[in-house]
Image: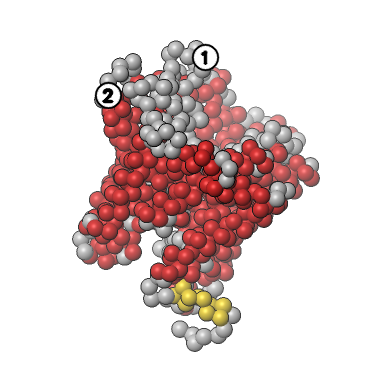
Amino acid sequence: MIRLERRPTPSRAWGAASPLLAVALTMMAGGLMFAALGKDPVEALRTIFWDPVMGEFAWYFRAQLLVKAAPLVLIAAGLAIGFRAGIWNIGAEGQYIVGAIAGAAAGLAFHPSESVLIFPLMVVCGALGGFLWAMIPAVLKVTLGTNEILVSLMLVYVADNLLASAAVGWLRNPEAVGFPGSRNLAQWEASANPELIAGTGMHWGVVAAVIAVIFAHVLMTRHLMGFHIRLAGQAPRAARFAGVAPARLVLFCLGLSGLLAGLAGLFEVTGPAGQISIDFASGYGFTAIIVAFLGRLNPLGIVAAGLLMAVTYVGGDNAAANLGIPGAAISAFQGMLLFFLLAVDVLSNFRVRVGRGALA
Amino acid sequence: MDLSAISPTLLVASLMVAATPILLAALGEMVVEKAGVLNLGVEGMMIMGAVTGFVAAIETGSPWAGFLAAAIGGAAMALLFGLLTQVLLSNQVATGLALTLFGLGLSALIGQGYVGIKATSLGRIDLGALSDLPFVGRVVFGHDPIVYLSLLLVLGVWAFLRFTRAGLILRAVGESHDAAHALGYHVRRVRMLAIAFGGACAGLGGAYLSLVRVPQWTEGMTAGAGWIALAIVVFASWRAERVLVGAYLFGGITVLQLNLQTAGARVPVELLSAAPYLVTILVLVLISVRAGRGGAAPADLARPFHAST
């Protein structure tokens, strides 16, 4: 008979070890999945996880790693703060899209000016777009008690349609006859978000991600707001007695995560993506949820998790090109990782006892 | 715009078809939530049902085998969720999200060889003279068997929760798992059964999309239907008959916006496509105005149960 016995406090050792164990288990299960697809599992795992970091063409892939990791870390850092407080913003994908549209629209309004103020203005508008999109579920939650999970998720689909109308309608490049999509923002000097150091893949989004992580770390460990957030998540009743206003937390957490997601969208549309197009939405907002959990909802852990997830993206593309492994296998793989992580977490909260113990 | 091109008979008939996937999924989820479990993975279970149902129907040539496979596929996904949340006591919100993300990826993987194939559809039940009646014939007697199955299921769930002992136990587990445990009921077993039922219903709903409504397999074809089903459970304040009303309301909006698009209404297409989601938000808002905080939700919804505490 196997029983679970609750630990008085969660085990720190298991808390640190469980992401590693989850990654190991996912690799095993992933290997089985690749074998089922008729591919050599060792070869597949090597192509996905080893080649992008250490292989022959790693110099090319490493630049891609930062490009993929930056939006994931930026979004996940914001989401994790909310998740800590039990506030579930799962509509980051929508805030990411609206941030990109708002920023791009603000910049394109001044086309073809070459003012140096345009890019900063776009950054501000991108952040504001994401912030306001996240304020819709936040305000509904605090004024009426509407479920923020469902509202923020529904707004992703609304944002998708907004993106489609922007790409084929009001933001369409007037000079490109018959093609949907906005002007290329990466090629217009005033709005471009270029590679800052050649060959590294580092663009302004990476800088913003680093700043966001440091800010989130200081907020959660040194600031009263961070303490309130952790308190509200771990002991909601105690938090209320201590005078924590839940409404303020909701507005803060949703607003901050929306702002960061909007920034991620803006840096993506001005850099790697280059333009507002129908297929701009790439699922970063959803993958960032996995990144946040894999990083233990801890800003520093999120950096590591974001880089690992970036490896699966880049390595997945590599495997698709070289081994013919379908791209969908990578999203299944990422979903599996979150499953294993949540399953392994039982070890940090409970002791496993074998045999018949005394009944409680 | 030519509004007269929209036939009310066809509108109501296609409304019922459009609503059936959401109705099935929402009904299953309602039972799960009544047992005190919040499974946010409806979207993932639906899409897995859609793909397993489609693949099975193509391989065997029988839509019925497809629906059976879909129910099994959905239930298997749900049991994965059950294993994590009930045995390994993981966070229900996070696990539900994981189920959706995993289901979307895995379904795309399974279905990649089946894109663009057309499924053999279910025939309508032919009731002879009854089906030929004007309006009533098409709306009441002119559907495929799954539409009737979904309506029977509404009736069954309603009666089960209201009149049977097992239904009472299920509700007790959802309202207070500690009290139910103290009375000797198997909280975990009841919840696992409810979760499996919810998964099977979501799977059926998904298969109805890929086998009847569309009828094709495309990646991510559920497009938020699972999330709308979750919203309908809230809208219905956890009552079977209101789930029916909610699902048909949403079916109506979906069909109406599609009809307006083809009739060339002077409204942007994107706004019409976004309408079902906007209306979902609006309904959630109206519900929270009416019900206040908490409302009719089962008291132990989404709270983990561990016998030692």
Give the position of the N terminus of chain A as an image quadrant. bottom right
- Residue B305 placement, left or right of B79: left
Q: Residues within 10 Å of mark 2 (few under 14, many from 20)?
A: few
The residues tagged by marks 2 and 1 sit, at their Cα atoms, a distance apart of: 31 Å
Q: Residue at x 47, y 39 (%)?
A: A63
- Residue A309 placement, left or right of B71: left
Q: Residue at x 48, y 75 (%)?
A: A351
Residue B210 seen in the figure: no
- Residue B117, how many percent across, how many down? 72, 34
Residue A207 seen in the figure: yes
Q: Give the residue pinned by disc 2.
A: A116
- Residue B208 placement, left or right of A66: right
- Residue A115, how many percent across, how many down? 27, 20
Q: A56 or A224: which is nearer to us?
A: A56
In this rendering, the answer to whether A190 lies above or below A316 is above
What amino acid type should be assigned to the residue bearing mark 1? Gly
Q: Residue at x 47, y 34 (%)?
A: A281
Quarter holding residue A16: bottom left
In the rendered structure, the residue with mark 1 lies on which chain?
A: A
Q: A293 or B187: which is nearer to us?
A: A293
Secondary structure of the residue carrying tag 2 is loop
Q: Residues within 10 Å of mark 1 (few under 14, many from 20)?
A: few
Question: Nearer the N terminus, badge 2 or badge 1?
Answer: 2
Q: Residue at x 65, y 29 (%)?
A: B134
What amino acid type should be assigned to the residue bearing mark 2? Val
Q: Give the residue pinned by disc 1.
A: A178
